[in-house]
Amino acid sequence: MERVAAENPSIAIEAVQDHLPALYFVFGRARTEELAAELGREWDFLFPDEKEMVLKAILETEKEHPEIFQRGHRRVLRKLLQQGIGYHHAGLSPVLKNLVERLYESRLLWVLFCTETFAAGVNFPAATTLFHSCRKWDGKEFRTLMNREFFQMAGRAGRRGFDRVGHVYIRIDDKFPEQTGFFDESQVESVYGRLTISPNTVLSLLKWKTDEEIDRFLTQNFSAYQERRAQREINQLLEELNRQYEQVKSIFCELRGEASCPLQRRKLIREQKRLRSSKYKNRPGSRERIEEIKQILANQQSQRCLHEVCADARDRLEALGYQRAGLLGQLNAVQQQSQKYIHEYHFVKGILENLGYIKGREFFARGNFALELHVQEIFVTELAFAGILEDLAPEQVAGILAGVDYIPGRREFVPAPPYDPTPVHELREELLAAGVPPQFLVWSSAPGFVAHAWYTGQGLDYLLENTSLQEGDIVSIIRRLIDLLRQIDDASHSNPSLRERVREIRRVIDRDEVAVVF
């Protein structure tokens, strides 16, 4: 692993030109495009026959999707691809992402600027990986990469059968040189299981499992296994500490704690001095305690012994005591954690009973409806049973459902939807007042404009011109909406009119670039 001090990507690529292809990781969509364009002004990696192969792939894509390179800065990408340079991020349309991936797999892209999503779940190795920065925005703050994140990306360096070793380069950030990161593979953070107890989880368990099976599910999942293993490890450490504690205690003689013990006499003398200080001498009981100590010291003579050994043992016991207290705290936290799934299960079950979804193991209409949902089950169910999905115009329903489980980006701009979302806000407030936790009521009006426009026939060009979203964002919003409509379709078997309505909405929006192919 080497460190490169260069803002210009050309300098970095020049340093690694004998170790291509390279994945250049950048933490920002716009920055991937900027750096790719900057490199393209100075570098061209392809021979004429390779350029023809790239052009053929581009023309085939354009034949099916004529407008694919006409939007935004995508014409620049078309030119870059023919130079063996590309970029890849979540804002690209699925068609463009697929094209870039195919060209990279065919060894027709020699430098690919990408965000960390390219390293997650997709096996595209490289001879070299470069990091433009080791700092990222995690949704709350900018921070240095964790070891696990770094090695997930750095691990792409080195292709089996091609490279003897992989090369990793880090660009030093002049503004934050101390946050460049010095990563240690032996310190990779552990991955912990996390069971999410959602309303669907509870309903499914009640519908299909016995009480014994539910208990086993809650107490013997992977996360619970990890916690039991942690308990065993902590208990083993406590046993070792207790053994050391008893071993150190054996050093002391029978005079420990007596006034004739030099260590105890020193302790009493220190207490006496403290009580004579201006801070304590006038406090009630101080004079009496001073006299008591004076008598104790006078009545017992100090013994001659190797009290330095005892002093070391005392300090060791104190250190062991601190370690033991820390381990006991960890053990208590783990023990509480091991019960959390049972508590969460009963908490969510109580909410469902209070809302009239179930009573014990008896399912009511709302419970059967929510059983078929897999996202924000309570909120979607209440939207349906409040009549909102049947009473409002279909384009409004599309806009409302698009906001389910949606969290806007920090720099995202989308106009307000062309309808009044007040009924949805009011429903959400009622559910919060009824004790439904906010994580079961995640909804935003932001995607409403997108879904409403798409339903009424507008295309990607219109949405790109009127929002800050990119193709990939828009496609994601509509495809998530299509999937939610499919879930509501499955849940509406006892309500033919609602089923017919959601099927019609899905038929209208499942088109063009966002079409879901099964």
Image (spheres, rainbow, N blue to C red):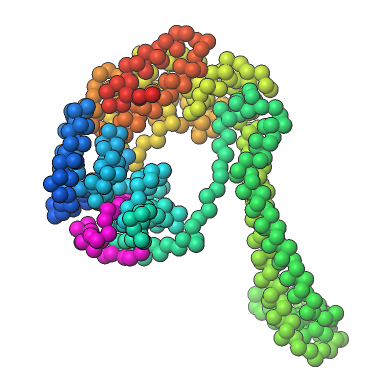
Q: Residue at x 65, y 51 (%)?
A: 229
Q: Is residue 245 left or right of residue 278?
A: right
x and y, in percent, of residue 391 in the image? 41, 11
Kindly give the residue lying farthest to the bottom in the view shown: 304
Q: Is residue 5 magenta?
A: yes
Would residue 48 be seen by someone viewing this image from the given angle? yes
x and y, in percent, of residue 107 in the image? 26, 47
- First to last magenta residue range: 1-28
Q: Residue at x 32, y 47 (%)?
A: 115
Vertical placement of 466 versus 122: above or below? Answer: above
Tell me the quadrant of the picture where the C terminus can be found: top left
Tell me the quadrant of the picture where the N terminus can be found: bottom left
x and y, in percent, of residue 215 in the image? 69, 35
Of residues 234 and 249, the one nearer the viewer is 234
What is the tally of numbered marks visible in this picture?
0
Kindly give the residue lying farthest to the front in the view shown: 161
Q: Residue at x 51, y 12 (%)?
A: 493
Q: Is residue 396 magenta?
A: no
Would residue 131 be seen by someone viewing this image from the given angle? no
Q: Which corner quadrant of the image does residue 52 belong to?
A: top left
x and y, in percent, of residue 263 in the image? 75, 82
Vertical placement of 378 versus 295: above or below? Answer: above
Of residues 471 and 288, the one nearer the viewer is 471
Q: Is residue 174 left or right of residue 429?
A: left
Vertical placement of 42 versus 414: above or below? Answer: below
Q: Residue at x 52, y 10 (%)?
A: 494
Q: Which corner quadrant of the image does residue 412 belong to?
A: top left
Of residues 137 and 18, the one nearer the viewer is 18
